[in-house]
Image (tube, rainbow, N blue to C red):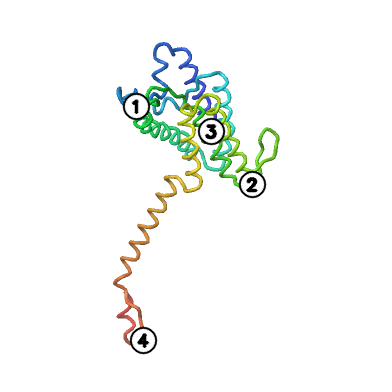
């Protein structure tokens, strides 16, 4: 599935490049279009678009390699749900922020690196203090996550902080997912709480048998 995500990212980016003067721009995330024109598909399509050749190559490699590593430990379904869900949610929060930061409403975003950086940071944080490999250099998982966040910081420092709003949101969501848990974990916790509550409710009618009442003659009274 990591390979398929990477291929989809490359295909979406090439489609944008070929048709950017006609329909390609409609695939990017433009908060003003999402709100005014109800182009809601942009919340999903922008996740598979990068607007520069180096951005396409780098994001696709990260999604392929880091996503593949996460897929081995999390499973395909969870990894894909995290990658796409985090990117879509980051876009949705970006649209919400455009009501406060008005320049965001007219900016267009590609989300390939939003997905790639979120996978990168999630992989690093999931390793924690365990050893990881960064281009041949041994680093801990936490340092690897900081390096991934550093790429987003550098992009914002060179090209403007508003351009990296979705990426920063993706990093925050990725860190929250690893540290706090995703929807699957909270659903299991909710189910566990409900089951525990039901069991406590069913046990209210039960009576504790005192030692002096535990005699052969009347023990059947407290059988149920």
Q: Which mark is residue 40?
A: 1
Q: Which residue is mark 3?
A: 117
Q: CA distance from mark 3 to mark 1?
A: 23 Å
Above or below 224: residue 54: above
Count residues near mark 3 (Cα–Cα under 10 Å), then give few for <14, some for 14-19, many for 20+.
Answer: many
- Residues under numbered marks 2 and 1 in contact, where contact means CB atoms less than 8 Å apart: no
- Secondary structure beneath dot 3 equals helix
Q: Which mark is residue 216?
A: 4
Q: CA distance from mark 4 to mark 3?
A: 70 Å
Q: CA distance from mark 2 to mark 4?
A: 61 Å
- Secondary structure beneath dot 1 equals loop
- Secondary structure beneath dot 4 equals loop
Above or below 213: residue 78: above
Q: Residue shown at 34%/66% (left/top)?
A: 200
| Mark in the foreground, 4 or 3 | 3
Q: CA distance from mark 2 to mark 1?
A: 40 Å
Q: Which mark is residue 130?
A: 2
- Residue 12: x and y, percent? 47, 21
């Amino acid at each position: 599935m990591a390979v398929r995500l990477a291929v989809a990212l490359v295909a979406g980016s090439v489609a944008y490049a070929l048709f950017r003067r006609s329909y390609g721009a409609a695939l990017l995330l433009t908060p003003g279009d999402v709100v005014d024109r109800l182009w809601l598909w942009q919340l999903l399509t922008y996740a598979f678009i990068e607007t520069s050749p180096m951005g396409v190559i780098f994001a696709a490699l990260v999604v392929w390699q880091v996503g593949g590593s996460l897929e081995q430990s999390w499973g395909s379904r969870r990894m894909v749900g995290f990658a796409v869900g985090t990117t879509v949610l980051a876009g949705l929060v970006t649209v919400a922020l455009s009501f406060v930061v008005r320049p965001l409403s007219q900016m267009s975003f590609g989300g390939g690196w939003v997905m790639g950086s979120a996978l990168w940071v999630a992989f690093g944080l999931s390793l924690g203090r365990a050893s990881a490999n960064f281009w041949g250099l041994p680093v801990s998982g936490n340092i690897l996550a900081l390096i991934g966040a550093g790429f987003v910081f550098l992009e914002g420092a060179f090209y403007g902080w508003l351009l990296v709003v979705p990426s920063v949101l993706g990093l925050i969501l990725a860190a929250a997912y690893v540290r706090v848990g995703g929807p699957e974990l909270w659903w299991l916790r909710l189910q566990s709480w409900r089951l525990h509550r039901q069991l406590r409710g069913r046990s209210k009618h039960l009576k504790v048998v005192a030692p002096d009442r535990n005699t052969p003659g009347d023990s059947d009274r407290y059988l149920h």
